[in-house]
Image: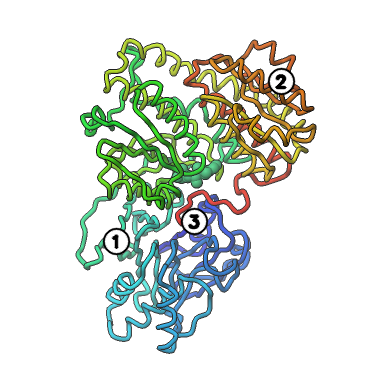
Amino acid sequence: MCGIFGYVGTRDAAPLLIGGLKALEYRGYDSAGLYVVGAGCIKAVGQVKNLEAKVGDTMKGHVGLAHTRWATHGVPSEINSHPHSDCTGKVWLAHNGIIENYSELKDELIAKGHQFKSATDTEVAAHLIEENLKTMPVFADALLAMLKMVRGTYGFVIASDQDPEKLYIARKGSPIVLGIGEGENFVASDPSAIVPYTKKVIYLNDGEWAEITSSSYKLFDLDGHEIAREPQVIAWDVEQTQKGGYDHYMLKEIMEGDNVIKNTLAGRLDEEALSIKLPELADVEDRLKDIKRIIITSCGTALYAGWVGEYLIEEYAKVPVECEYASEFRYRSPIVEPGTMIMTITQSGETADTLAALREAKRQGAMIVSIVNTVGSTIARESDAVIYNQIGPEIGVASTKAFMSQVTLLTAFAIKLAELKGVVTAEANKDIVREILALPEKIKTILEAREDIKAVAQKYASYDDFLFMGRKYTFPIAFEGALKLKEISYVHAEGYGAGEMKHGPIAMIDEKFPTVALCLNDSVYEKMISNVQEIKARSGRVLALATVGDETMKKMADEVIYVPAIMEMLEPVLCVVPLQLFAYYIGTGRGYDVDKPRNLAKSVTVE
Ligand code: F6R
């Protein structure tokens, strides 16, 4: 999704702006542009390196703003890419989000004589400021008036020739972060772009805006009242935002797997007492004891983690759980009865549908507990309690390490809730905790065998259709394995519950349509064996994921990827790892840049 970067200081702004945009490339975009006060605006379609080549060292100036655009209104083109300006070329701005009433505002502005260049919603904001300046001599007043006129969502960075030593930023629905440096300040839509320069940041809340110079910043609300807020320090380092020696962020993030589990559990697992602690739930523990129902709502990979959560919580904490697409929940008049807890799961903390679902549930009075990776994100701030993943930024567009961490936290949550509800004793949980402690080593053995998985992937690289099937705890993993494959290799892949095979999908099976079957030694193993036999009887090729030592599967399937034996409830986090690697090697084998899959964005901040 779109990215924003801005700089005000004493250094040459242009190279810093290009660097900032490069750090945001992972978010997905189709064009880029920058404006440097006193030096002008340059835009380019395609990658940031195209923009860099056009900029060269021609632009001198120490205040500027830049943007990577992911088209929503108007095709990807130089004209439509940001920054946009008013008629006079004195107001320049970049915007993330959607201005919903742009069409009526544009008509009014055109009637007043304004000339528009682009097809974007964003451009109206620049012309509105220009119009307001006719009656408001102070730039900040004209800007504030504009913010009150637009409906929809925005993260703005704005420069003006009237205040050439300042940048302005504003936020409603689209994240904007201010980075506080020494004699220089930065702004970005995502803190990972700021971390190379400073770790001191201020997150803007919805309805806030700021005026920034090289040595100062002032924060305001929409009534113009100044807000006092101390910067917070980001715990990530630059190293965590780089590839760490791997070819792709995606591989680096999968290979972090064992540490992801350890980091996720840091401070949450008492190794001596063999118990789970979730201190972040302390304030809501009393309410948790009384909850009667849980609705988990999220999108994409995070939703599939939620499906695992549904199984875990119902089995262990005996609380009824439904898990549903946030994009449906927000529109289908859901009934959130008293005693219902809503859980959202989100890596970015900014997914538009998940946020809207959260707000709808909150409007109906529900308590919100969220699993979030991005500290300070909107969903984190709007939840009653947040369990952070503690795994650093996820850069690869395809979510991998976040899923492992989300499922781990859901396991911890189910255990904790079971204890709070008194449906299981701490003593009984010790076996599970022991198994959780062994998880990093088990994941490590899979990661160490990645060359074997690569060899298997090579055998399957030329197929154009795949079925992934699982049952019970591997059911959500079948969907996640299929999602991973389709998003980075553009191969058709479907996830299915194995029990559903006979109800339709088996008609598709032939020698050109292989199946990835998740057949671990668990309570549904026999059922899975029957499904594999049915596929083999129809000339289908089978790649099985099986438990180490399973000789039956070796005979039955065409290829087998083995995973260590594990307690059934912990299967999801283990099984997903080889499927992530399988997708990675098929995608890279087909020559794709798996870190930037086509048409996808890392943070989906529009619906
Ligand atoms: C798939 C993927 C997406 C995200 C989804 C939710 O690999 O990354 O399906 O899981 O867009 O994103 P978050 O977790 O940021 O809410």
Label at residue 45: none
Label 1: which secondary element:
loop
State the image coordinates of residue 272 (x, y, percent, origin top left).
33, 12
Regarding residue 60, the answer to whether it shows in the image is yes
> Which residue carries the number 2 mark?
533
Q: Could you tell me the amino acid type at mark 2?
A: Gln
Classify mark 2: residues with Cα within 10 Å, few (<14), some (14-19) or many (20+).
some
State the image coordinates of residue 352 (x, y, percent, origin top left).
42, 52
Q: Could you tell me the amino acid type at mark 3?
A: Gly
Nearer to us in this view, 541 or 121:
541
Cα–Cα span, label 3 and label 1: 25 Å
In the rendered view, tell whether residue 317 sits above or below residue 389. above
Label at residue 20: 3
Asked if the residue at tag 2 contacts the one at tag 3, i.e. Cβ–Cβ closer than 8 Å, the answer is no
Q: Could you tell me the amino acid type at mark 1?
A: Gly
Nearer to us in this view, 356 or 336:
336
Point out the tag, 1 or 2, that comes first from the N-terminus. Answer: 1
Residue 123 falls left or right of residue 171: right
For discs 3 and 2, the disc positioned in front in the rendered view:
2
Q: Which residue is rendered at x = 72% and y = 44% of the image? A: 591
State the image coordinates of residue 263 (x, y, percent, origin top left).
42, 28
Label at residue 207: 1
Question: What number of labels is visible?
Answer: 3
In the rendered view, tell whether residue 207 sits above or below residue 343. below
Point out the tag, 3 or 1, that comes first from the N-terminus. Answer: 3
Cα–Cα span, label 1 and label 2: 59 Å
Residue 433 falls left or right of residue 141: right
Point out the tag, 3 or 2, that comes first from the N-terminus. Answer: 3
